[in-house]
Image (cartoon, helix red, strand yellow):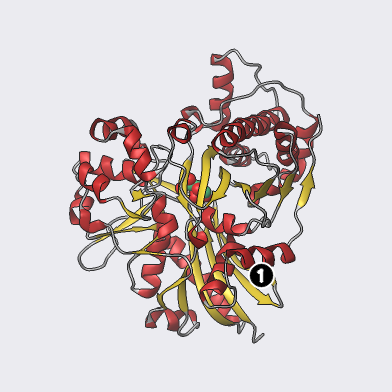
Amino acid sequence: TNKNIYLAADFGGGSGRVIAGFLLHGKLELEEIHRFPNRQVKLGNHVYWDFPALFEDMKTGLKLAAQKGYNVKGIGIDTWGVDFGLIDKHGNLIGNPVCYRDARTDGMPAEVFKVLDEKKHYADTGIQVMAINTLFQLYSMKLNQDSQLELARQLLFMPDLFSYFLTGVANNEYCIASTSELLDARQRNWSQETIRTLGLPEHLFGEIIQPGTIRGTLKEDIARETGLGTVDVIAVGSHDTASAVAAVPATEYPIAFLSSGTWSLLGVEVDQPILTEEARQAQFTNEGGVGGRIRFLQNITGLWILQRLMSEWKARGEEQSYDIIIPQATEAKIDTIIPVDDTAFMNPENMENALVNYCREHELQIPQNKAEIVRCVLQSLAFKYQQAVEQLNRCLPSPIRQLNIIGGGSQNKLLNQLTANELGIPVYAGPVEATAIGNILTQAMAKGEIADLHELREIVIHSVTPQVYYPKK
Ligand code: LFR
C-alpha cells in the first residue's frame, strides 16, 4: 500500500478518469481509480461542459486514491483541446465553459480572415484553421459583445482551470495553449500580433509554462477534503493528444502516430514547426508537444460518429456493444465512403439520420442495417487516414514506414486492419491508455525519475506490447 504513485486526471470529450501510475525498475503499472462520463449540456442558447461536476468527479478520484493509502507524488491533468474558462477579478469562474461544438463559431473563420491575412497567420501560428479553435470562440464573443469577455481577467484552458482550482495558481500550459491558434509557433509564446490585430483583451493571456514543471501544491482545503495532504500539481502535456503522443511506444524517427478517440489526430513528431504553404494547404497543424517537440498532425473527425450512433441506438433501447457490432461490421459489405469531416456530422440532432440523408443526397448506396452503418463509418475513416498520410508524406523528406495507433480507438480491430490495408504499411495498436501514461511519465520526468522523452518512451516500450496489423488486400 505504501506505493509511490502519480495520479493522472484525464478528461476526454466522452469520459474522464483518474488513473494511478506506479513506476518500478523502468516499468510502469497503471490502476484505474475512478471513471466517469463527460457530456455536453445544452442550456438556453449554448452547449456547455459541466465543469463543477467534472471537478467533483476528479476530487472523488483523488479521495479514492488517498483512501488506498497511496503516497501520491504528483497530480497531472490533461483534457481535450481548445476550450477554456474565464476568471473574474475575484478569481471566480465566470460561467460554465462553452463546448467547442457550440454553434457560436459558425462562420467565424470568414470573419477573422477579413482582419488577418490567412497565409501569414498560418506562417505565424502553424495551426490548421478549425472553427472550434479558441481564437474563433473568442472572436465570436468579441463580435457579440459578450459580457463575460468584458468581465474576464484571465483565460484558463480546461487543464489550466482544473489546476487553478486545485492550487490557486493561474497560468497557461504550452501544449494546450498551442491549440488556441494564438501562439507563435516558433517562439512558443503568445502571438501578440495576432491578439492585437483581432482586438482581443491582452490581459487574458497569462504566463506560458512548459510540461514537466511544477504548477503548485494542493490548496489547504482541497488537501484536507481529499485526504491527500500537500501534493504537487505538475504540468504535463496537458492537451490529451500531447500526453498520448509522448507515450507512443517507438523511439525511431519519424515517430508517426494516430491518436484515436473522439477525434483522430494523425501525424508525426518533429523538432521544429513546418510552416510551409504546402503544410497549410494540406491542413496540417503544428501543436506543442512534450520535451520541446512539435506535433505535426491533421485533426480528423474520429470515432465521434460511431460514438454518437452507439448512444442513439442505446437510447432507443437497442443495447449495443462493440464486441458484437464490430465482428458484424467485419462481415458487412457496402461500398459507401462518407467524408467524415463534413459539417453534416459535426453535431447533428440525430447521427443516423444525418448519415442516411447524406448518402441519399449524394446518391451513395444507403447502409441498410447497423452492421453496414458501422462498416461504412470505419472504412470512411480508414480512407481519410490514407489521404492524410499521402499529404503528410509530401511534407516530409521521406515517407513514414509504420503507424502507431494509440488511445481508446486502438481497440477497434476492424479499424486497425482497414487502416493497415489502406496505408500499405504495418500498424501498431496500443496502448489504449496512452494519454494517462504520457501524463504520468511526464510527472516522473518533472520529479527527476526520468531523464528525457527518449527514456520516457523506452519505459513505455518495456511496459506495453502493441498489436501488429500487416496490410492485407
Ligand atoms: C482530442 C482533442 C483533439 C482536439 C479536440 C478538440 O481529445 O483534444 O486533439 O482537436 O479534442 O479539442
**Residue matched to label 1:** 31
Q: In which quarter of the image is the C terminus?
A: top right
Considering every residue shown, the one lying at the far bottom of the view is 2
For the point 70% across and 20% down, the residue is 335
The answer to whether residue 281 is above or below residue 100 is: above
Q: Is residue 450 visible?
A: yes
Camera-side residue: 415 or 397? 397
The answer to whether residue 208 is above or below residue 344 is: below
Camera-side residue: 406 or 320? 406
Q: Can residue 50 be seen in this view?
A: no
For the point 59% across and 77% down, the residue is 449
Amino acid carrying label 1: it is: Glu
Hey, which quadrant is residue 264 in on the image?
top right
Numbered circles on residues, count = 1
Q: In which quarter of the image is the N terminus?
A: bottom right
For the point 46% across and 78% down, the residue is 232
For the point 52% across and 31% down, the residue is 341
Please tell me how crowded label 1 is: few (under 14), some (14-19), or many (20+) other residues with Cα within 10 Å: few
Hey, which quadrant is residue 30 in on the image?
bottom right
Percent position of residue 221, x then y: 38, 81
Tell me: 365 left or right of 147: right
